[in-house]
Image: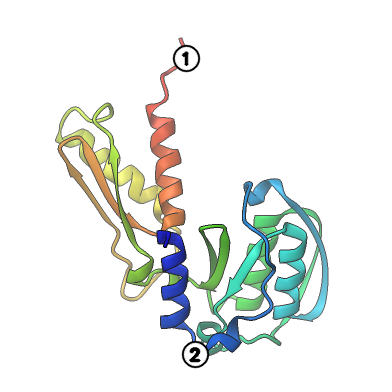
Amino acid sequence: MKYGMFLIALWLVTRSAGCASLDRTVDHRLGPDLSKRWVSVEFVAVPFEEAIDVWSEQADVSTIVNWRVLELSGIDRTTPVDLILEDAPADTALQLILDAVGGGFVLLSSMRIDGHLLVSTRDDFDAPEFQQTRVYDVSELIGDDDDATAVIEFVAGALDDGVWRDPPRQLRIRYWDGRLLVDCRPDEHEVVRDLLSKLLEPEPI
């Protein structure tokens, strides 16, 4: 079983109170960058579940909502959504929907795993089962300990979402023998990979 599918299975088993809470997902694979897909919505007191269905259909994405965790945070399928957008990037539209539902009190987020988009609370995604350790070769960037410290701080800053947490989230970023060991979510690893790739690009002559 692929690691991504294992994470989805683990998430559904450990975070949901039964399969009935995970119905009505759109059966498509998540392909190109969502910022390159466009959606238009006109939601006036539309139930959250319906809003997610409409967004998923337009964005052509398989979406799994962890209703159990959301309900524990005071958000359910009928929570009304008020949002009107025309030709907006799909990722922006989704986050606006989640922000509207959270009302500034509950932080909702999404994460891509193995062709699916998972929706839950930010705290849920900070749970240990979503963290992966990956190793990045940064030997070309680092000459001494000061360089290592600078790269670690740079990566940590890129992963800082500016959200206050109590207790604070502890990112684990370590340097060892020309390599950076980073523990974070799969979607954050995409950020790390892209960031380091840009740092390693040769400067134009």
The residue that label 2 is drawn on is 17
Label whose residue precedes the other's in the sequence (2 or 1): 2
Q: Quadrant of the C terminus?
A: top left
Question: Percent position (x, y) of residue 138?
Answer: 27, 34
The residue that label 1 is drawn on is 204
Which residue is painted at 45% across and 39% down in the image?
194
Identify which residue, 199 or 113, lies in the foreground: 113
Which residue is painted at 60% across and 77% down in the image?
102
From this viewpoint, is residue 103 visible?
Answer: no
Residue type marked 1: Pro
User: Residue 165 occupies which quadrant of the picture?
Assistant: bottom left
Which residue is painted at 40% across and 45% down in the image?
192
User: Residue 136 occupies which quadrant of the picture?
Assistant: top left
112 relative to 104, above or below: above
Q: Quadrant of the N terminus?
A: bottom left
Q: Residues within 10 Å of mark 1 (few under 14, many from 20)?
A: few
Give the foreground label among 2 and 1: 2
User: Residue 98 occupies which quadrant of the picture?
Assistant: bottom right
